[in-house]
Image: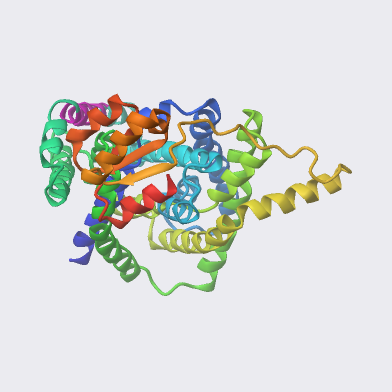
Amino acid sequence: EIGELSSLGLIFLLFMIGLELDVKALLKMGKVVLVTGLMQFPICAGIQIMIFSGMQSIGLSFGTGAYSAMYVGMVCGISSTMVVVKILGEKGEMESQPGRLTIGILIFQDIWAIVVLAIQPNLASPEIVGILKTFGMIFVLICIAMAYAKFIMPAMLYHSSRNIESMLIMSLAWCFFLGIVAILPFIGLSMELAALIAGVALATFPYSAEFNGKIKYIRDFFITLFFAGLGMQIPMPSIGAIATGFVVAVVVLIFRWLGIFLLVVLMGGGAKLGAIATLNLSQVSEFALVICSLGMGFGHINTDTMTIIIWTFAILAIASSYIMGYSLQIYKKAAALGNKLRGRPEGEGSDHGHDDHGDHRDILLLGYHKVAFMLVAEMKAKSPQLLKRIHVVDFNQDVMPKLRAIGVSCSYGDISSPDVLEHAFHG
């Protein structure tokens, strides 16, 4: 059936999200990212659940399921990794300060999504023992994944790194191996959660961009089937469902400012940084569809709730493509209006956040063979100060220790891949 095939799209999607979730990089982020990322989802989800429950009590329907208002409020607390990363990549802002803050918050949202997926099966009968058992099994699965990632996967990926196709097969085999372990009767977790953990385990390797570039074509095919399957389950939308979707979208847009902008400002990030990050994250995640799809399987909600979430997702995805495209201009207009209302001169109180500090590499070598080798050797002999400005992208890992020894940074990548070239262009 199309439903069984489309579930592969969710597995690939969550695997790719996991590949972007580098825990080591997360711990190196500043307090603004850490505090905002930790607190944003509980604040937004908690307030939205209370508001939607109140609306439901006065007659606004979010579906006939017992947990419909709670599901709508909860899933709308997460923003879309797929939409945000795509637009930031096209704008070349992934490495900007607002871009890094945005990605950092998205990573924490993905972690919160793991928590939601863990407690979701026990939502109807939230027994402490059952929830603790679920988290215990997740911990066991993470330990298995990290043990493989530390002791087995490095050698396997190193020896297959010269052949991109074999690396792709290896990564997918790893994803489904962990998924099979997860669905064993005595573990009892979902393949979707296992795919996310499998991606996280591989995120620390230098091949994650390469994996994402290759897997996305398979993912897109099955994701198309996933959305087609959802569409086949949903009845013809009514005016009421569309109007409710608009109401939910407005509430999401309003309370993103409380959950992101206010926290960033309180943590000293500045109004500009907080405003642009908030505008970047003003949409609902594809995770909302995943969680609601699973919720329908558990009997928590019905198709009416899914219809509302799909309309909310569509409305905000379309709106955010324009909002993110003009985020800086929107901030400038809002700041000017705010200064005018407070009687301040235009430009007063504007801030630039924290300056970007980092290793600036503005000489990029795509491939490291005879010509590049001779060029680097010439620079080492005559202008060694230039070595600190060079970054090499190549798929031959044997040369990387030698390059790093002389101060040249390098990363793994197949320069025939458009995604690797795009990463190189954006830094």
Q: Position of residue 308 (x, y in %)?
A: 47, 61
User: How many labels were placed on the picture?
Assistant: 0
Residue sitting at 66 percent across and 37 percent down?
Answer: 352
Q: Position of residue 176 (x, y in %)?
A: 15, 45
Q: Nearer the viewer, residue 362 or 230?
A: 362
Residue sitting at 51 percent across and 27 percent down?
Answer: 30
Q: Main secondary structure of the magenta part?
A: helix
- Residue 146 is covered by the magenta coloring: yes
- Residue 64 is covered by the magenta coloring: no
Instruction: Give the magenta range.
Output: 136-149
Can you say whether 225 is above or below 330 in the image? Answer: below
Q: Is residue 126 left or right of residue 143?
A: right
The picture quadrant where one finds residue 6 is bottom left
Residue sitting at 19 percent across and 36 percent down?
Answer: 397
Can you say whether 33 is above or below 367 in the image? Answer: above
Q: Which residue is at the far front?
A: 382
Can you say whether 316 is above or below 168 in the image? Answer: below
Tell me if I can see residue 58 in this picture.
Answer: no
Q: State the quadrant of the N terminus.
A: bottom left
The picture quadrant where one finds residue 46 is top right
Q: Nearer the viewer, residue 77 or 300?
A: 77
Tell me if I can see residue 208 in this picture.
Answer: yes
Q: Position of residue 52 (x, y in %)?
A: 56, 50
Q: Position of residue 237 (x, y in %)?
A: 45, 72
Can you say whether 1 is above or below 137 in the image? Answer: below
Q: Is residue 196 left or right of residue 313?
A: left
Q: Which residue is at the far bottom?
A: 236
